Image (tube, helix red, strand yellow):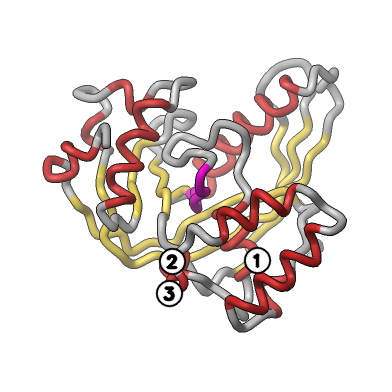
Amino acid sequence: MPGAELNDNIPVKRISNITHRLINSRHPAVGVFDKVATRDQAIAAMLVEQLTNPRHTSASERFFRIPEGELVLGKPGATFIMGAFIHTGEGGGRFHTEELGAWYASLSIETALREMAHHQYIRLKKSHMDINGTIIQLRELVARVNADFHDLCDLERTRPELYDANDYSHSQSLANGLRSANSNGICYKSVRHMGGENLVVFKPPLLPPIQQGDHYQYEWCKDSEPVISKLTNIS
């Protein structure tokens, strides 16, 4: 597999840190994976949802690609965690393909806000709508990770293709090799926030418990950078 030959040359770093992930506030805080306790119950629930939402067909296929021992079920935040792995956009992301998602988070809320602002802007531009006046509200998900991660932070100059702002083919290839070799995930520099660092977590059990943090609002006016506000009194 392309990229797999680099596994032995990538340093491993212990990350014991609070991480920050932002998701759209319209997603419910509690979902099916919080309520089911077994793999069979989760499969049954997804099959029911497929009857009214065809999107869940591809989600079910990804669910079966997760080893049974790595499923997170029946815990607070389980739906948030599993959703990151079974719902993924077209083309995947920097360190995952459409075959299976991953959990992306930042080591600071400032980096998470910058990362999400970029990806929300790209999504809005693809919709061909006038984004001026668009408002999006987000909730912060906080998780403490304590595990070894493959560290790409010092490869920015020697392997710049892994940090390409738009082309993810090289980084996906490398990630596929690491994932196949049982990597916990990757620590890497943020492309959107100078000095920031991100994590991509390949194993769901490394994440619980998930706690809800603050709420934020993006409002686009005349350019690609939204006005960012922290909201209060929102549950």
> Which residue is nearer to you in this view: 223 or 162?
162
Q: Is residue 180 visible?
A: yes
Residue 225 covered by magenta stretch: no
Distance, label 1 to label 2, CA atoms, is 17 Å
Q: Is residue 224 above or below residue 123?
A: above
Q: Residue 20 at x, y = what percent?
A: 52, 54
Q: Is residue 31 left or right of residue 141?
A: right
Circle 1 residues within 10 Å: few <14, some 14–19, many ≥20: many
> Which residue is nearer to you in this view: 145 or 36?
36
Read off the residue under disc 3. Answer: 69
Q: Nearer the viewer, mark 1 or mark 3?
A: 3
Q: Is residue 157 above or below residue 44?
A: above
Residue 79's tag is 1
Mark 1 or mark 2, which has the lower sequence index?
2
What kind of residue is marked 2?
Pro
Residue 103 covered by magenta stretch: yes
- Residue at 32% x, 21% y is 161
Instruction: Say what secondary structure mark 1 lies in.
Output: helix
